[in-house]
Image (cartoon, coloured by chain):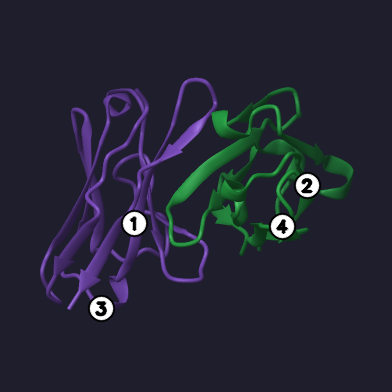
Chain colours: A purple, B green
Amino acid sequence: SHDLTQPSSVSVSPGQTARITCSGDVLTKKFVRWFQQKPGQAPVLVIFKDSERPSGIPERFSGSSSGTTVTLTISGAQVDDEGDYYCYSAADNNRGVFGRGTKLTVL
Amino acid sequence: DVQLVESGGGLVQPGGSLRLSCEASGFTFDSFLMTWVRQAPGKGLEWVASIKHDGTGKFYVDSVKGRFTISRDDAKNSLYLQMNSLRVEDTAVYFCRVVTFTGDFWGRGTLVTVSS
Protein backbone atom coordinates (compact mmCIF):
# COMPACT_ATOMS: atom_id res chain seq x y z
CA SER A 1 0.00 0.00 0.00
CA HIS A 2 1.18 3.50 -0.76
CA ASP A 3 -1.17 5.32 1.60
CA LEU A 4 0.31 7.93 3.93
CA THR A 5 -1.46 8.58 7.22
CA GLN A 6 -1.33 11.90 9.07
CA PRO A 7 -3.29 13.24 12.03
CA SER A 8 -5.98 15.64 10.90
CA SER A 9 -4.98 18.32 13.39
CA VAL A 10 -2.30 19.30 15.86
CA SER A 11 -2.56 22.19 18.28
CA VAL A 12 0.18 23.78 20.39
CA SER A 13 0.79 27.01 22.27
CA PRO A 14 3.38 29.47 20.97
CA GLY A 15 6.87 28.37 21.96
CA GLN A 16 5.92 24.74 22.37
CA THR A 17 7.11 21.90 20.17
CA ALA A 18 4.75 20.65 17.48
CA ARG A 19 5.15 17.16 16.08
CA ILE A 20 3.34 15.91 13.00
CA THR A 21 3.65 12.29 11.99
CA CYS A 22 3.30 10.56 8.64
CA SER A 23 3.03 6.79 8.50
CA GLY A 24 3.10 4.32 5.65
CA ASP A 25 4.66 1.02 4.65
CA VAL A 26 6.45 2.65 1.73
CA LEU A 27 8.40 4.90 4.07
CA THR A 28 10.89 2.15 4.83
CA LYS A 29 12.04 2.48 1.20
CA LYS A 30 11.22 6.03 0.14
CA PHE A 31 12.11 9.48 1.40
CA VAL A 32 9.47 11.95 2.48
CA ARG A 33 9.02 15.63 1.70
CA TRP A 34 7.05 17.95 3.94
CA PHE A 35 5.11 20.91 2.59
CA GLN A 36 3.56 23.83 4.42
CA GLN A 37 0.51 25.44 2.85
CA LYS A 38 -1.25 28.58 3.95
CA PRO A 39 -4.75 29.54 2.73
CA GLY A 40 -4.83 30.62 -0.88
CA GLN A 41 -1.14 29.90 -1.44
CA ALA A 42 0.92 27.24 -3.14
CA PRO A 43 2.66 24.69 -0.94
CA VAL A 44 6.18 25.44 0.29
CA LEU A 45 8.78 22.74 0.86
CA VAL A 46 10.06 22.71 4.45
CA ILE A 47 11.81 19.31 4.63
CA PHE A 48 13.13 16.89 1.99
CA LYS A 49 14.86 13.50 2.20
CA ASP A 50 13.12 12.98 5.57
CA SER A 51 15.32 15.44 7.45
CA GLU A 52 17.03 17.90 5.10
CA ARG A 53 16.01 21.54 5.35
CA PRO A 54 15.97 23.74 2.23
CA SER A 55 17.76 27.06 2.36
CA GLY A 56 15.57 29.77 3.79
CA ILE A 57 13.58 27.46 6.05
CA PRO A 58 14.01 28.30 9.75
CA GLU A 59 16.09 25.94 11.89
CA ARG A 60 13.09 25.25 14.11
CA PHE A 61 11.82 22.93 11.37
CA SER A 62 13.35 19.46 11.48
CA GLY A 63 12.51 15.97 10.34
CA SER A 64 13.23 12.44 11.48
CA SER A 65 12.44 8.92 10.42
CA SER A 66 11.95 5.62 12.20
CA GLY A 67 10.68 2.55 10.44
CA THR A 68 7.36 3.29 8.78
CA THR A 69 6.93 6.70 10.41
CA VAL A 70 8.47 10.05 9.67
CA THR A 71 8.01 13.06 11.91
CA LEU A 72 8.07 16.79 11.25
CA THR A 73 9.07 18.70 14.36
CA ILE A 74 8.66 22.42 14.82
CA SER A 75 10.62 23.49 17.89
CA GLY A 76 9.36 26.67 19.46
CA ALA A 77 6.36 26.94 17.15
CA GLN A 78 5.29 30.43 16.17
CA VAL A 79 1.89 31.77 15.20
CA ASP A 80 3.25 32.23 11.69
CA ASP A 81 3.77 28.46 11.46
CA GLU A 82 0.02 27.87 11.38
CA GLY A 83 -1.20 26.17 8.25
CA ASP A 84 -1.70 22.81 6.65
CA TYR A 85 1.21 20.39 6.46
CA TYR A 86 1.43 17.56 3.96
CA CYS A 87 3.86 14.71 3.70
CA TYR A 88 4.69 13.43 0.22
CA SER A 89 6.44 10.37 -1.11
CA ALA A 90 7.19 9.03 -4.56
CA ALA A 91 6.46 5.42 -5.49
CA ASP A 92 8.60 3.04 -7.50
CA ASN A 93 6.32 3.46 -10.49
CA ASN A 94 6.99 7.20 -10.88
CA ARG A 95 3.78 8.12 -9.15
CA GLY A 96 3.45 10.32 -6.11
CA VAL A 97 1.20 10.38 -3.09
CA PHE A 98 0.39 13.01 -0.47
CA GLY A 99 -0.82 12.44 3.03
CA ARG A 100 -4.27 13.86 3.77
CA GLY A 101 -2.74 16.84 5.56
CA THR A 102 -2.51 18.08 9.13
CA LYS A 103 -3.90 21.41 10.23
CA LEU A 104 -1.48 23.02 12.68
CA THR A 105 -2.93 25.55 15.09
CA VAL A 106 -0.62 27.68 17.22
CA LEU A 107 -2.49 29.65 19.86
CA ASP B 1 14.34 32.79 -10.58
CA VAL B 2 12.17 29.78 -11.35
CA GLN B 3 8.65 30.72 -12.37
CA LEU B 4 5.69 28.52 -13.23
CA VAL B 5 2.53 30.19 -14.50
CA GLU B 6 -0.60 28.12 -15.03
CA SER B 7 -3.49 29.12 -17.24
CA GLY B 8 -6.51 27.63 -18.96
CA GLY B 9 -8.80 27.00 -16.01
CA GLY B 10 -12.44 27.94 -15.98
CA LEU B 11 -16.01 26.72 -15.72
CA VAL B 12 -16.97 23.67 -17.77
CA GLN B 13 -19.95 21.37 -17.81
CA PRO B 14 -19.66 17.71 -16.85
CA GLY B 15 -18.42 15.73 -19.82
CA GLY B 16 -16.61 18.72 -21.24
CA SER B 17 -12.94 19.37 -21.92
CA LEU B 18 -10.28 21.86 -20.91
CA ARG B 19 -6.60 22.24 -21.68
CA LEU B 20 -4.36 23.61 -18.95
CA SER B 21 -1.00 25.17 -19.68
CA CYS B 22 2.01 25.88 -17.51
CA GLU B 23 4.65 28.27 -18.81
CA ALA B 24 8.04 27.76 -17.18
CA SER B 25 11.10 29.98 -16.91
CA GLY B 26 14.30 30.29 -14.92
CA PHE B 27 15.55 26.73 -15.39
CA THR B 28 16.48 24.28 -18.12
CA PHE B 29 12.98 23.05 -18.85
CA ASP B 30 13.91 19.98 -20.88
CA SER B 31 16.06 18.55 -18.08
CA PHE B 32 13.37 17.89 -15.49
CA LEU B 33 10.29 15.82 -14.83
CA MET B 34 7.17 17.99 -14.64
CA THR B 35 4.08 17.32 -12.55
CA TRP B 36 0.47 18.42 -12.12
CA VAL B 37 -0.98 18.43 -8.61
CA ARG B 38 -4.56 19.40 -7.77
CA GLN B 39 -6.47 20.49 -4.70
CA ALA B 40 -10.24 20.31 -4.48
CA PRO B 41 -11.93 23.11 -2.52
CA GLY B 42 -11.24 22.64 1.18
CA LYS B 43 -9.42 19.36 0.55
CA GLY B 44 -5.85 18.10 0.46
CA LEU B 45 -3.26 17.88 -2.26
CA GLU B 46 -3.49 15.14 -4.87
CA TRP B 47 -0.75 14.12 -7.30
CA VAL B 48 -2.37 13.94 -10.75
CA ALA B 49 0.24 13.27 -13.42
CA SER B 50 3.94 13.50 -14.24
CA ILE B 51 5.94 13.48 -17.44
CA LYS B 52 9.62 12.64 -17.75
CA HIS B 53 12.11 15.24 -18.94
CA ASP B 54 12.22 13.75 -22.43
CA GLY B 55 8.50 12.98 -22.65
CA THR B 56 9.07 9.23 -22.91
CA GLY B 57 7.24 8.40 -19.70
CA LYS B 58 3.83 9.63 -18.60
CA PHE B 59 2.23 8.65 -15.31
CA TYR B 60 -1.28 9.23 -13.98
CA VAL B 61 -3.35 8.79 -10.85
CA ASP B 62 -5.90 6.04 -11.44
CA SER B 63 -8.89 8.40 -11.27
CA VAL B 64 -7.82 10.33 -14.40
CA LYS B 65 -6.34 7.54 -16.54
CA GLY B 66 -7.93 7.48 -19.97
CA ARG B 67 -9.39 10.98 -19.52
CA PHE B 68 -6.39 13.24 -18.94
CA THR B 69 -3.23 13.52 -21.05
CA ILE B 70 -0.06 15.22 -19.89
CA SER B 71 2.33 16.61 -22.49
CA ARG B 72 5.15 19.08 -22.89
CA ASP B 73 6.62 21.34 -25.54
CA ASP B 74 10.27 21.95 -24.74
CA ALA B 75 10.59 24.54 -27.49
CA LYS B 76 7.97 26.62 -25.70
CA ASN B 77 9.06 25.71 -22.15
CA SER B 78 5.49 24.64 -21.54
CA LEU B 79 3.63 21.83 -19.83
CA TYR B 80 0.07 20.88 -20.66
CA LEU B 81 -2.81 18.88 -19.25
CA GLN B 82 -5.59 17.94 -21.65
CA MET B 83 -8.63 17.07 -19.59
CA ASN B 84 -11.54 15.27 -21.27
CA SER B 85 -14.76 13.74 -19.94
CA LEU B 86 -14.56 16.04 -16.95
CA ARG B 87 -16.45 15.15 -13.81
CA VAL B 88 -17.74 17.23 -10.92
CA GLU B 89 -15.06 15.62 -8.74
CA ASP B 90 -12.33 17.05 -10.98
CA THR B 91 -13.16 20.50 -9.63
CA ALA B 92 -9.94 21.79 -8.09
CA VAL B 93 -7.05 24.20 -8.27
CA TYR B 94 -4.44 22.64 -10.54
CA PHE B 95 -0.81 23.36 -9.73
CA CYS B 96 2.23 22.87 -11.94
CA ARG B 97 5.31 21.63 -10.09
CA VAL B 98 8.98 20.97 -10.80
CA VAL B 99 11.82 19.70 -8.66
CA THR B 100 15.18 20.98 -9.84
CA PHE B 101 18.67 20.85 -8.33
CA THR B 102 17.92 24.10 -6.50
CA GLY B 103 14.46 23.51 -5.13
CA ASP B 104 10.87 22.32 -5.31
CA PHE B 105 8.85 24.91 -7.22
CA TRP B 106 5.11 25.39 -7.66
CA GLY B 107 2.95 27.76 -9.65
CA ARG B 108 0.03 29.64 -8.12
CA GLY B 109 -2.48 27.31 -9.70
CA THR B 110 -5.47 27.63 -11.99
CA LEU B 111 -9.03 26.86 -10.90
CA VAL B 112 -11.09 24.31 -12.80
CA THR B 113 -14.78 24.17 -11.95
CA VAL B 114 -16.90 21.36 -13.35
CA SER B 115 -20.56 22.14 -12.88
CA SER B 116 -23.83 22.22 -14.76
User: x%, y% of residue A48?
Assistant: 38, 45
User: For the residues carrying marks 4 and 1, which lies nearer the camera in this image?
Assistant: 1
- The disc placed on residue A79 is 3
Badge 3: chain ID? A
Badge 4: chain ID? B
Q: Secondary structure at mark 4?
A: loop
Residue bearing mark 1: A85
Badge 3 density bin: few <14, some 14–19, many ≥20, Cα 10 Å: some
Q: Secondary structure at mark 2?
A: loop
Pointer 2 with pointer 3, Cβ within 8 A: no
Badge 2 density bin: few <14, some 14–19, many ≥20, Cα 10 Å: some
Residue bearing mark 2: B16
Of the residues under marks 4 and 2, which one precedes in the sequence? 2
The residues bearing labels 4 and 2 have C-alpha atoms spaced at a distance of 34 Å
The residues bearing labels 2 and 1 have C-alpha atoms spaced at a distance of 33 Å
Residue bearing mark 4: B26
User: x%, y% of residue A45?
Assistant: 43, 55
